[in-house]
C-alpha cells in the first residue's frame, strides 16, 4: 500500500488535503495476538485469518501506538 493523498470537502465546502498514513505489516512475523487491533483507538487494524491487516488506512492518525505495542515489531508507520 503506497503513500497517497486525497482531498475532501470540509464544512465550508473548501478543499483540504488529507495525507493517508503508510502502514506496513510484516505478516511473516505476526502471530495474531491482536494487541495492535485492540490498542488502535481509530479502529484502523483488524485480524484476517489470525493475521493483522489494515482495515482502513485513511483513518490512521500515525500515533504509532500499534508500533509500540506489537511484541514482534511487525508494524511500520511512515
Ligand atoms: S498509528 Fe495509531 S491510528 Fe494508525 S493504526 Fe497504529 S494505532 Fe491506529
Ligand atoms: S500486535 Fe503485532 S503480532 Fe500482534 S496482531 Fe498486531 S501485528 Fe500481529
Image: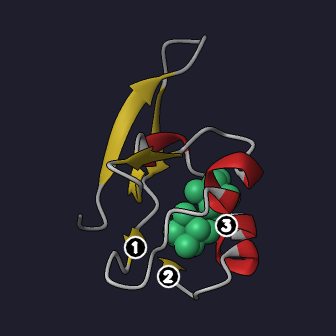
* Mark 1 or 3, nearer chain start: 1
Secondary element type, mark 2? loop
The residue located at (42%, 40%) in the rendering is 56
Residue behind mark 1:
25
Among the 4 quarters of the image, the one containing residue 42: top right
For residue 45, which numbered disc appears in the image? Answer: none
Q: Quadrant of the N terminus?
A: bottom left
The residue located at (68%, 83%) in the rendering is 71
- Find out if the beta carbon at label 3 lies less than 8 Å from the nearest ligand 1 atom: yes
Residue behind mark 3:
66
Is 47 left or right of 37, judged from the image as shown? Answer: left
The residue located at (37%, 81%) in the rendering is 26
- Name of the residue lying farthest toward the left: 1
- Find out if the beta carbon at label 2 lies less than 8 Å from the nearest ligand 2 atom: yes
Spatial CA distance of label 2 from label 1 is: 5 Å
Q: Position of residue 32 (x, y in %)?
A: 50, 62
Amino acid at each position: 500500500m503506497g503513500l497517497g493523498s486525497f482531498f475532501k470537502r470540509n464544512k465550508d465546502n473548501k478543499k483540504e488535503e488529507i495525507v493517508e498514513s503508510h502502514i506496513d505489516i510484516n505478516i511473516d512475523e505476526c502471530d495474531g495476538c491482536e494487541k495492535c487491533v485492540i490498542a488502535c483507538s481509530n479502529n484502523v487494524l483488524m485480524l484476517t485469518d489470525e493475521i493483522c491487516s489494515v482495515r482502513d488506512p485513511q483513518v490512521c492518525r500515525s500515533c504509532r501506538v500499534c508500533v509500540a505495542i506489537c511484541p514482534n515489531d511487525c508494524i511500520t508507520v511512515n
